[in-house]
Image: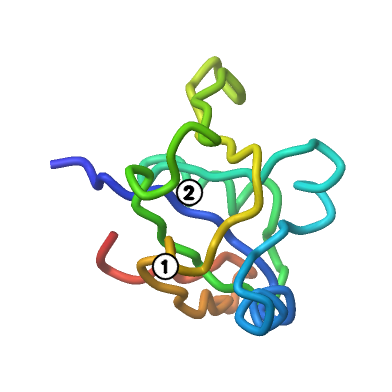
């Protein structure tokens, strides 16, 4: 069964700011593109490998897309696949979990066993 959740990776420092304010505004790329980038469970590992390899201090943010509403759009992106994009800030109330995403010796992130 495919996970119903969507995922975003962010720096712990940005997440700490979100916890203080109640909202996550996105990282530099999100702000540049005008939306918060998410991936499905099937997409998130490749996203990490392509765009965040070797980046330490990341958290894996798990969100139930049903909690977000109409600001979430599924749009064609990498490899002509649909990716979830949030055209709003993310309320921390809509976050299921935020889990540390450590780096392995090879610079690849080590994902939790569950999605």
Image side of residue 44 versus residue 77, left or right: left
- The residue shown at (33%, 50%) is 5
Q: CA distance from mark 2 to mark 1?
A: 9 Å
Disc 2, SS: helix
- The residue shown at (58%, 36%) is 85
Report the front residue among 105 and 47. 47
**Label 1 belongs to which residue?**
111
The residue sitting at the left extreme is 1
- The residue shown at (86%, 42%) is 32
Estimate the x, y position of residue 90 in percent, counting from the top left.
Answer: 58, 56
- The residue shown at (42%, 67%) is 111
Estimate the x, y position of residue 46 in percent, counting from the top left.
Answer: 52, 45
Disc 1, SS: loop
Marks 2 and 1: CB-CB under 8 Å? yes
Residue 83, placed above or below residue 96: above
Estimate the x, y position of residue 57 in percent, counting from the top left.
Answer: 67, 80
Report the front residue among 9 and 93. 93
**Label 2 belongs to which residue?**
44
Image side of residue 63 versus residue 20, left or right: left
Residue 65, placed above or below residue 54: above
Residue 50, placed above or below residue 52: above
Nearer the N terminus, badge 2 or badge 1? 2
Q: Dividing the image into 4 quarters, which one contains the C terminus?
A: bottom left
């Amino acid at each position: 069964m495919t996970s119903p959740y969507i995922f975003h990776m962010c720096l712990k420092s940005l997440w700490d700011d979100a916890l203080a304010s109640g909202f996550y505004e996105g990282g530099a790329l999100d702000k540049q593109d005008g939306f918060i980038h998410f991936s499905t469970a099937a997409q998130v590992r490749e996203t990490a490998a392509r765009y965040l390899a070797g980046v330490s201090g990341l958290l894996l943010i798990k969100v139930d897309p049903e909690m977000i509403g109409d600001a979430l759009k599924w749009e064609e992106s990498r490899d002509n696949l649909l990716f979830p994009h949030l055209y709003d800030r993310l309320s921390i109330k809509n976050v299921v979990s935020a889990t540390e995403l450590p780096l392995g010796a090879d610079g690849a992130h080590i994902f939790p066993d569950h999605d």
